[in-house]
Image: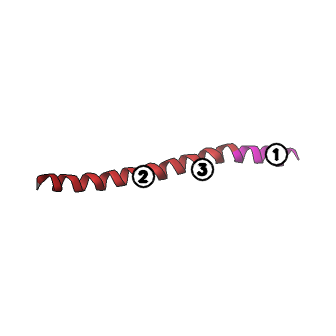
Amino acid sequence: MNKEITEQPRSKTLAWVKRLGFWGFMFFTIKGLLWLIVPAAIAYFSCG
């Protein structure tokens, strides 16, 4: 009985960690790409 009670919140916590991990990865991937694209676009259009 105790095993069921402790197992349920742990699986909920694990699901949240996985969800936040995925979205954190997506956020920093997009942010990193923008840090590369925005200065390159500014340089490209300002020299043209």
Q: What residue type is disc 2 on?
A: Leu
Q: Which residue is mark 3?
A: 30
Question: Which residue sits at x=40%, y=51%?
Answer: 18
- Nearer the observer, 48 or 5: 5
N-term mark: 3 or 2: 2
- Element on which disc 2 rests: helix
> Magenta region: which residues?
37-48
On screen, residue 40 versus residue 26, left or right, reads right
Q: Check if mark 3's residue and mark 2's residue have beta carbons within 8 Å.
A: no
From the viewer's perspective, is the residue at label 3 or at label 1 nearer? 3
- Please identify the dominant SS of the magenta region: helix
Q: Residues within 10 Å of mark 1 (few under 14, many from 20)?
A: few
Q: What residue type is disc 3 on?
A: Ile
Q: Which residue is mark 1?
A: 44
Residue 7 point in image, percent of width and height = 21, 53
Residue 1 point in image, percent of width and height = 11, 56
N-term mark: 3 or 1: 3
- Nearer the observer, 12 or 27: 12
**Which disc number belongs to residue 32?**
none
- Element on which disc 1 rests: helix
Please identify the quarter of the rendering in which residue 19 is found: bottom left
On screen, residue 6 versus residue 48, left or right, reads left
Question: Which residue sits at x=42%, y=52%?
Answer: 20
N-term mark: 1 or 2: 2
Q: What residue type is disc 1 on?
A: Tyr
**Which disc number belongs to residue 20?**
2
Question: Which residue sits at x=75%, y=44%?
Answer: 40
Asked if the magenta segment contains residue 40, the reply would be: yes
Question: Which residue sits at x=37%, y=50%?
Answer: 17
